């Protein structure tokens, strides 16, 4: 259920996220170098610079409603370009986790992909591309997406048809559980 935060709640949430990301929001002076270099900018509804600005204002509702937090590829180009090395991908990631927790999702397919990916990691201790691709295509309704690439990927062994589990799968599950618990307690 979507919850709109008031200004004070938004400010507190932005401050906590910034603290956890080791970012000093006031250091951003809106030069825009991050947005200019972002490879995902064309698809975003709010530029990386605007995300930081909204967080400075404590408007976390707008941040969590944006597509941008779901589209950030964590490539770190913005961090490299920023005069203060502001860690925007971590701000994006933590905002995305908050949005997910609150049932806010501007890009349904990304969330779907993320959920299936996490379940395959929980089940096998690592990603299983065959399940990931198949389950995503079926549940998203994009039945034939990327299908034409499959024969070549199999031939080059980029993906393998057989499923296997890592030996330490229980340890992976414990780590995931701890992370989820940490998120819920924050
Ligand atoms: S590059 Fe850094 S200082 Fe400039 S707008 Fe982006 S986050 Fe702010
Ligand atoms: S880390 Fe995200 S916001 Fe930064 S440049 Fe890459 S895609 Fe853009």
Image (tube, helix red, strand yellow):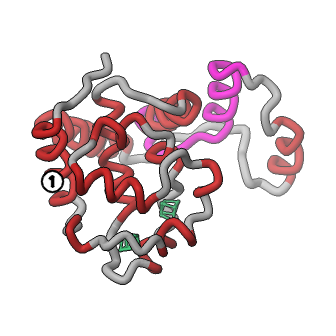
Q: Position of residue 81 (x, y in %)?
A: 46, 79
Q: Position of residue 56 (x, y in %)?
A: 24, 57
Q: Residues within 10 Å of mark 1 (few under 14, many from 20)?
A: some
> To which residue does mark 1 refer?
15
Q: Quadrant of the C terminus?
A: top left
Q: With 120 as the anchor, is 13 left or right in this view?
A: left
Residue at (24%, 61%) from the top-left corner? Answer: 21
Looking at the picture, tell me which residue is in the foreground, 103 or 159: 103
Q: In the rendered view, tell whether residue 120 sits above or below residue 127.
A: above
Q: Quadrant of ligand 1?
A: bottom left
Q: With 77 as the anchor, is 4 left or right in this view?
A: left
Q: With 139 as the anchor, is 127 left or right in this view?
A: left
Residue at (56%, 70%) from the top-left corner? Answer: 36
Q: Secondary structure at mark 1?
A: helix
Question: Is residue 31 in the magenta section?
Answer: no
Q: Kindly indicate the quadrant of the structure image that contains residue 4.
A: top left
Question: Is residue 140 in the magenta section?
Answer: yes
Q: Quadrant of the N terminus?
A: top left
Range drawn in magenta: 122-141
Residue at (36%, 83%) from the top-left corner? Answer: 83
Question: Majority secondary structure of the magenta segment?
Answer: helix
Residue at (35%, 39%) from the top-left corner? Answer: 62
Looking at the picture, tell me which residue is in the foreground, 10 or 162: 10
Q: Position of residue 69 (x, y in %)?
A: 44, 46
Looking at the picture, tell me which residue is in the foreground, 62 or 17: 62
């Amino acid at each position: 259920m979507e919850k709109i935060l008031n200004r004070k709640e938004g400010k507190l949430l932005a401050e906590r996220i910034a603290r956890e990301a080791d970012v000093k929001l006031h250091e951003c002076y809106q030069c825009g170098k991050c947005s200019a270099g972002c490879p995902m900018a064309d698809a975003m509804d709010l530029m990386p610079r605007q995300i930081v600005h909204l967080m400075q204002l404590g408007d976390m509702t707008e941040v969590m409603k944006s597509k941008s937090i779901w589209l950030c590829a964590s490539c770190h180009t913005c961090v490299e370009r920023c005069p203060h090395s502001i860690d925007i991908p971590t701000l994006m990631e933590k905002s995305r986790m908050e949005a997910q927790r609150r049932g806010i999702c501007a890009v349904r397919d990304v969330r779907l992909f993320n959920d299936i990916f996490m379940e395959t990691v929980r089940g096998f201790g690592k990603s299983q591309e065959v399940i990931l691709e198949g389950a995503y295509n079926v549940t998203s309704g994009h039945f034939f997406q990327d299908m034409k690439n499959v024969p070549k990927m199999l031939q080059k062994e980029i993906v393998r048809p057989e499923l296997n589990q890592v030996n330490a799968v229980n340890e992976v599950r414990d780590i995931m559980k701890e992370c989820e618990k940490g998120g819920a307690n924050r």
